[in-house]
Each structure stands twice: as C-alpha cells, then as structure tokens.
Amino acid sequence: DVKVTQSSRYLVKRTGEKVFLECVQDMDHENMFWYRQDPGLGLRLIYFSYDVKMKEKGDIPEGYSVSREKKERFSLILESASTNQTSMYLCASSFQRDQETQYFGPGTRLLVL
Amino acid sequence: AQKITQTQPGMFVQEKEAVTLDCTYDTSDPSYGLFWYKQPSSGEMIFLIYQGSYDQQNATEGRYSLNFQKARKSANLVISASQLGDSAMYFCAMREDDYGGATNKLIFGTGTLLAVQP
C-alpha cells in the first residue's frame, strides 16, 4: 500500500512566522507535489519535484518555497506566513511512468492568524 | 490552455440509486489522461478511476464507471447503487501535457459535493 504522510493535520501560526510543512512517501516515487485547496477553486499546484534537489514552480508559487533533499521527503516552506495562506495543503507523489495516478496525503489544514 | 470544468457544485442522490457527475475538458493534445478522485470529509484524496484518451472502452472499477465521450470532450463519472459512504467531494482531473517528460502533473476541476440521502 502506498503511504503518503504529512507532518501535521492541523496547524495554527501567526502572521510573519516561518512555516514548514513536511511530506514523506514510502513508495520510491520520483515525483512529488504540493497543492493548496480552497473552496470553489479546486486544487492548485504550488510546486512539484521530479527528482532530488529538483523543483519546478506550479501555478501559484508566490510566497512559497520547497526543499527536496531526499527522495522520500518534500517540504513546503512559507517564508513569512500571511492570512491569505490559510488553506488546506495537500501533498502527493507518483511514479514518472505515463498515466500513473498521484497518491495523496491526508492534508494539513493551516490557519494563519 | 488545458482546462477541466465541473458545473455541478453539489448534488443529492437517494441511497441505492445511480448518479452521474459531470466533467468536461479542453485540450489540444491528442494524448491525455482523465482521472476521478473522491475526497471524504477526512480530507484525503482517493483515486477512483482512470481513462486514457486512446482507450477504446469506457473504464470501470466496481460501482464506478466513466462515461467517456471523446467528441464531446466529456468524462462523466457514474456511481451505481449509491451508498451513504459515497457522500464526499468528487474531483475530475486531467494529466497535463508535458511532452513526454512524465511529470504527471494534473489539472483539477472545482469539484462536486455529493450527498447521499437514506
């Protein structure tokens, strides 16, 4: 069974704090993804990574950065959290083979006050 | 630009009845893949079914089937014999064209919230 875990289910932070969201997968997937999910907007891709130390911007990278030092771990960093980053954050991973589905973690609900 | 549209923000269905969730897509790429995911209140996205653009037959997985109409660019999800546990948000997604790079990036629709009534 594929397992994607995220470090926290719920997180409350103050404006201006640096926030780390961690994601770990145990299936040796090459690709890893970070999304945010907001009502009425579906899932929007923030960043993705196709290899260790490799990253590419998604559709909404502003205000975020990522780190992939090991194949199984992909971190999302909010350098200075703002209230408009209050959202549900979902991590996913997949093989690079064509037509492979993505497997998702349980999500982190972040509230920035 | 590629796009996924789900026009039904929410739906009701009676337990044991079938329900169709609509999804239309837009792409100029002849090779693409379409996915459906279920997101229960717990938040985790669960993969349900996949349809490739060159697949001759509609995909089926248990009570889920995908009504793929290529000319109309639609990929509706059909759930037969609805159960209370089917109450969830459902997302349609399309694999983004990456010119053979296999990054498997997905574009998601805005979702349909399904409520199954006893």
Image (cartoon, grey):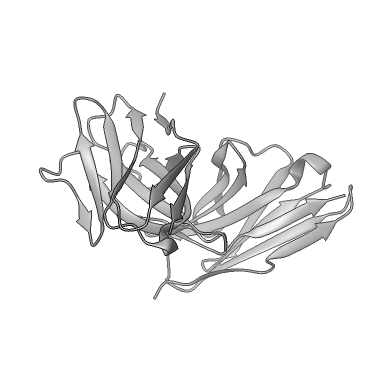
Relative height, residue B27 to residue B99 (above, below): above
> Which of the image's four quarters has the N terminus of chain B?
top left
Query: How many marks overall?
Result: 0
Q: Which residue is drawn at 37% across and 38% down?
A: B98
- Relative placement, left or right, of A40 versus B17 is right
Left or right of residue B75: residue A44: right
Q: Quadrant of residue A76?
A: bottom right
Depicted A108 relative to depicted B36: above or below: below
Residue shown at 44% from the left, 48% from the top: B90
Quadrant in which the C terminus of chain B is drawn: bottom left
In the picture, measured across the screen, residue A73 lies left or right of residue B48, that is: right
Residue A28 lies, in percent from the top left, at 43, 70
Q: Visible in this render: residue A99? A: no
Front residue of B1/A107: it is A107
Tell which residue pokes out farthest to the left in this image.
B56
Q: Of all residues shown, which one is farthest toward the front? A: B118
Depth check, front residue: B47 or A34: B47
- Where is residue A25? Give x, y as percent: 51, 69
Q: Position of residue A58 (x, y in %)?
A: 55, 39
B73 and B62: which is toward the camera: B62
Any part of residue B28 in sight: yes
User: Residue drawn at (87%, 53%), measured in percent from left and top?
Assistant: A17
